[in-house]
Amino acid sequence: MMMMMMMQRLRRSEEFIRFGFTSLINLRPNKNSVSRSLSGFVNHYDTKGKLFESKNGNHYNTELHHRCLGKNLGMLQQYKCFGSSSASQIERNPLFSSLDSKDVSYFKEILGDKNVVEDEERLETANTDWMQKYKGSSKLMLLPKNTEEVSQILQYCDSRRLAVVPQGGNTGLVGGSVPVFDEVIINVGLMNKVLAFDEVSGVLVCEAGCILENLATFLDTKGFIMPLDLGAKGSCHIGGNVSTNAGGLRLIRYGSLHGTVLGLEAVTANGNVLDMLGTLRKDNTGYDLKHLFIGSEGSLGIVTKVSILTQPKLSSVNLAFIACKDYLSCQKILVEAKRNLGEILSAFEFLDSNSMDLVLNHLDGVRNPVSSTENFYILIETTGSDETNDREKLEAFLLKSLEKGLVSDGVIAQDINQASSFWRIREGITEALQKAGAVYKYDLSLPVEEIYNIVNDLRGRLGDLANVMGYGHLGDGNLHLNISAANYNDKLLGLIEPYVYEWTSKHRGSISAEHGLGVMKANEIFYSKSPETVAIMASIKKLLDPKGILNPYKVLPHSLISH
C-alpha cells in the first residue's frame, strides 16, 4: 500500500518543480548556515592525547594555549572563548605594537574620517563573530575603497608591527574573521564592484567585498549562476569565500573554489600587490600561486579581487525530500544517485532525526514534508536543461529506490514554496541550534562509510549530557557534527575534545572540511596534517609575512609562528 501511495505521489506531474534555477535558489533562507571547504589529508601519525609521534620516532607537542574573552593583564593579554578547543590560553604576541593616536591620524589621511571607525557600537559588532562565541577588543576598523588603500594600510601596519585581521561578512564559524586581541580590523565591504563579465566564457571579475547573493543576482540577469551557494549568501563576501575556500551546496556539481577561481589579486603584509588576476582556464607557466591564498584565511595576504568561472543558468530544477530507515540506505542511495542522476545531480544533503526534531521544535512554520518519521532524511536536487527528461529520471530513480527498500517515504516539491520549505529544514539547523542553547560545532571530512559512526560513538560517550546530531553534505563526505547542550561547561568539553579530533584522525579524515581552522583549531592541525607539511606551511607564512601581522593566532600552531 505504501509503495502504491508513493508511486502515485511521484507520478503526479503537478508535483514536480517547473521553474528556473535562480528562482529556487534565491528562496533559500539567508541564514548564516555557513559552509567552508578544505580537502582532507590522510596522516600517518599515532595520536596520543595531544602529543604526536611520527613513525621515525620524533615527537611534536601540539598542546594549545587557548580559549575567547580578552583579559588585560598589564602588557600581557589572554584570550578565552566558549565551546571550542582546549581549556588553555593564547597570549598576545608581545612584539606587536599597540595602536596610538598617530596611527589613527595616518589612517584618516589616506582613507578619510568616515572610513576610520572608532565608534564603540560598530566596533562591538565587528569584534564579535555572529555566533557570539569569539570576541576581540579592537579599537579601530578601517574601510578601504580600493586595492591601493589596502596596500597603504598594510605597508604602514607592517612598518609599525600592528597586527591586522581581514574581515568581510563575518559569517565564519571558527573565529577566523574577528580579532583575538586588539588587531586592527580591515573590512573590505566598500570594495564591492563587478569589474567585468564575459558572456562567452562565463568569467566574472569582481572586487573582494561583493556579497555572494548580489553576484548571483547580477549573473541571473546575464543567464548565469555562481558555482557557489551558501546559506549565508546574503551576508558573506566573495573575498571571504575565497580566503576560506568555502564549499557549500553545489560542490558536488561544480567542485571547490580551487577549481572555479581562475585568478585573484592579493596584497601581502608589506603592501606588495600580487596581480594573479588571470581569466584563462589554462595557464601552465610556473607555480600557480593563487592556490596559496585560497583557503589560507587571510594569513598570507588580503584578497582584493577575484576572477571566477560561472555556469550557465539551466531551466530545469527538481527537488526531492525522502526518508530512510538507516545510514546504510543513505549510502546506497548516494551511490545510485551518482550512477543514475550523474549529469544532473546538483545537491545531495542529509540530516538525522535529531536534527529534524530540533528544527521542528525551534523554528516556526516548519513541518516534516513526509508522513513517516524515520532516522534519516535526504534532499536530492537535480539541475538540467531538459525538464521532461530530468523529471522522468528523478521519478524513475526514486521509484527504484522505493522498490529496493532504500526509501520509506518521499515527496518531490510541487512548487516554489514547497521547494523553499524543504531547504528551510536543511539550512535552518544552524539557527535552531542557536536557539536551543550552547552548541559545540565540528566540521569533518570522513570516508562516507564512517561518517555516522562518530555520531553514534559520541552519543554513547556523552549519554544524557548533550544532544548529538549529524547532518551535512553527504555527496562530499562532509559531516557537520553538532553537540547541543543547555550551557557551555568544561566537563562536557573535556569529553568532546580531543576525542573528536583523535577519532577523525584515526579514521583517516580531516578536522576541517569547509569551515577552516581559524583560532578554534589552529593548534589541532596535526590531527590532519603531518609535522613536515605544517613546517612547510609555517615557512611560507614566514616568507610572505615575516612579522606575522596578518590574522595572527589563526590557521597555524602558535608555537610555529611566534616571532
Image: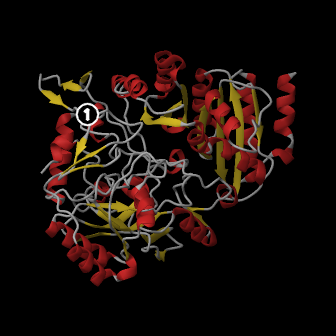
Q: Nearer the viewer, residue 339 or 372?
A: 372
Q: What residue did someone put label 1 on?
A: 526
Q: Would residue 454 be found to the left or right of residue 175 on screen?
A: right
Q: Which residue shows up at 46% across the image and 23% down it?
A: 454
Q: Which residue shows up at 41% across the image and 26% down it?
A: 496
Q: Would residue 25 be found to the left or right of residue 67 on screen?
A: right
Q: Nearer the viewer, residue 431 or 511?
A: 431
Give the number of marks: 1
Q: Nearer the viewer, residue 340 or 246?
A: 246
Q: Secondary structure at mark 1?
A: helix
The 10 Å Cα crowd at callout 1, few under 14, some 14 to 19, many 20 or more, is many
Q: Nearer the viewer, residue 364 or 372?
A: 364
Q: Residue furthest front?
A: 74
* Image quadrant where residue 286 sits: bottom left
Q: Which residue shows up at 23% across the image and 60% down it?
A: 163
Question: Is residue 467 depicted above or below 529 in this figure?
Answer: above
The image shows residue 115 at horizontal and vertical percentages of 38, 77
